[in-house]
Amino acid sequence: MKRLVLVAITAAVLASSAGMAAAVTINDSVDRFTGIRKVMWTPVPSKPEEFTLTTALYMRKESGLSQLNISLITWADQQQYKSCNHIFWLADGKRVDGMNSEYSATHTNSAVIETFKLNPTSEALGELESATTVEFKVCNTEGVVSHDDLSGFKAVYAESKK
């Protein structure tokens, strides 16, 4: 997954440099070798310092096991959140607790991709699922999860509950 995101973001960096836009849709597929179903919403930030929320679900039907991966991703010319990478969340203007995250940065030739892998509690997931607006604050940078990213999260999360 990390490599897929890295490739996608690198492609977005190159595409934005050329003035092109990238389209993203929910991908639902089953690996014919492993039987693992993947339902993924993996948008890529189209410009530097923009954030996107990605959501991926991996399920094995036979065992009933599943894994939900949610990440907030951004990129820029240089690393911005190495020493200040905590995130605060609001759902419909109300604080959301239980949204721990793990920070990582990947350096490429032309950019630094910063990823915040979210580890939300089930209560926090429920608050995000029912929200119409989700806001976040990374260090001192405030942002809003786009309507498309929130809809993508909700669609993938709904599949995890089936």
Image (spheres, rainbow, N blue to C red):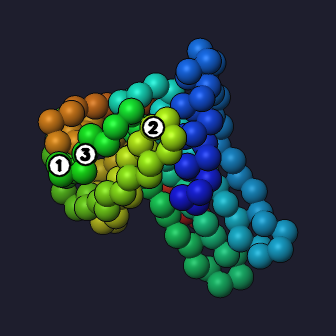
The residue shown at (54%, 31%) is 13
State which quadrant residue 143 falls in.
Answer: top left
Q: How many C-alpha atoms fall within 10 Å of the one at disc 2: few (<14), some, or many (≥20)?
A: some
Hey, which residue is sitting farthest right in the picture? 32
2 vs 1, front mark = 2
Where does label 1 land, which residue?
84
SS for callout 3: loop
Q: How many C-alpha atoms fall within 10 Å of the one at disc 1: few (<14), some, or many (≥20)?
A: few
* Disc on the earlier residue, 3 or 2: 3
Q: Can residue 146 be seen at all in this image of the molecule?
A: yes
Q: CA distance from mark 3 to mark 2?
A: 14 Å
Hey, which residue is sitting farthest top in the picture? 19
Badge 1 amino acid: Cys
Percent position of residue 150, x then y? 44, 39
Instruction: Identify the disc placed on residue 25.
Output: none
Percent position of residue 61, x then y? 69, 76
The residue shown at (56%, 21%) is 17
Q: Can residue 115 be seen at all in this image of the molecule?
A: no
Percent position of residue 54, x then y? 49, 47
SS for callout 2: loop
Instruction: Identify the disc placed on residue 81.
Output: 3
Which image quadrant: the N terminus?
bottom right
Where does label 2 land, which residue?
111
SS for callout 1: loop
Q: CA distance from mark 2 to mark 1?
A: 19 Å
Q: CA distance from mark 3 to mark 1?
A: 5 Å
Hey, which residue is sitting farthest bottom in the picture? 63
